[in-house]
Amino acid sequence: MQAEVALIMGSKSDWATMEGATEIMDALGVSYHVEVVSAHRTPVKLAEFSESAADKGFKVIIGGAGGAAHLPGMVAAHTHLPVLGVPVQSKALNGMDSLLSIAQMPKGVAVGTLAIGTAGAFNAGLLACQILATSNPELAERIKTFRQQQTDTVLANPDPREV
Ligand code: RP5
């Protein structure tokens, strides 16, 4: 079965962060493909991957990268599919470099930028599911259930001193 989401990242070192996207996609029953595709180390592969992504059946691409994080922007330059960018926390600048590299796209080529690090990766997976849910009512119901469970958990235990 063809995966609906392509989850790509610039390096194997990004996996510890990007794995968070798979957590929520697994929970919501959305299929994904995972692969290292580097804007700088494998630029031809990046172009070929991005140009063929729609024809392969992918509907959303999540790209995670750190430092000079050109991956999501360059993917977006090669496809009309929605691209979600996750700034991986870098050692030198704590991910501020990654964030600005991904967020500051020029007008006309869009990347949806998430938060730095694991929260951003998780939310990229969630947002990919929400995009797919616009044409999948059953997935939309599963997302609503997830959100309600999250709300119920917080409301059920409002004392910050209790675990
Ligand atoms: C980026 O450089 C990657 O996305 C990664 O976050 C960062 C460091 O890569 P490695 O040197 O760990 O392979 O391209």
Image: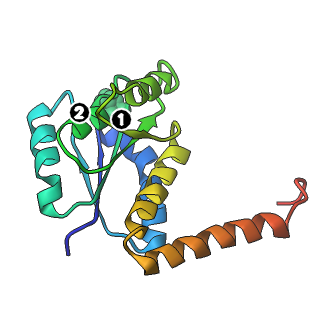
Secondary structure found at label 2:
helix
Residue type at tag 2:
Met
Spatial CA distance of label 1 from label 2 is: 12 Å
The circle on residue 114 is none
- Taking the spot 75% from the left edge, 71% from the top edge, the residue there is 152
The residue at 78%/63% (across/down) is 154
Q: Quadrant of residue 156?
A: bottom right
| Rendered view: 36 above or below 148 | above
**Camera-side residue of 52 and 160:** 52
On the rendered image, what quadrant is the C terminus found in?
Answer: bottom right
Q: Position of residue 116 (x, y in %)?
A: 51, 36
* Tag 1: amino acid: Ala
Ligand 1: does it lie within 8 Å of the C-beta at label 1? yes
Instruction: Give the labeled residue for mark 1.
Output: 65
Q: Residue at x 39, y 75 (%)?
A: 136
Q: Residues within 10 Å of mark 1 (few under 14, many from 20)?
A: many
Residue 74: numbered disc: 2
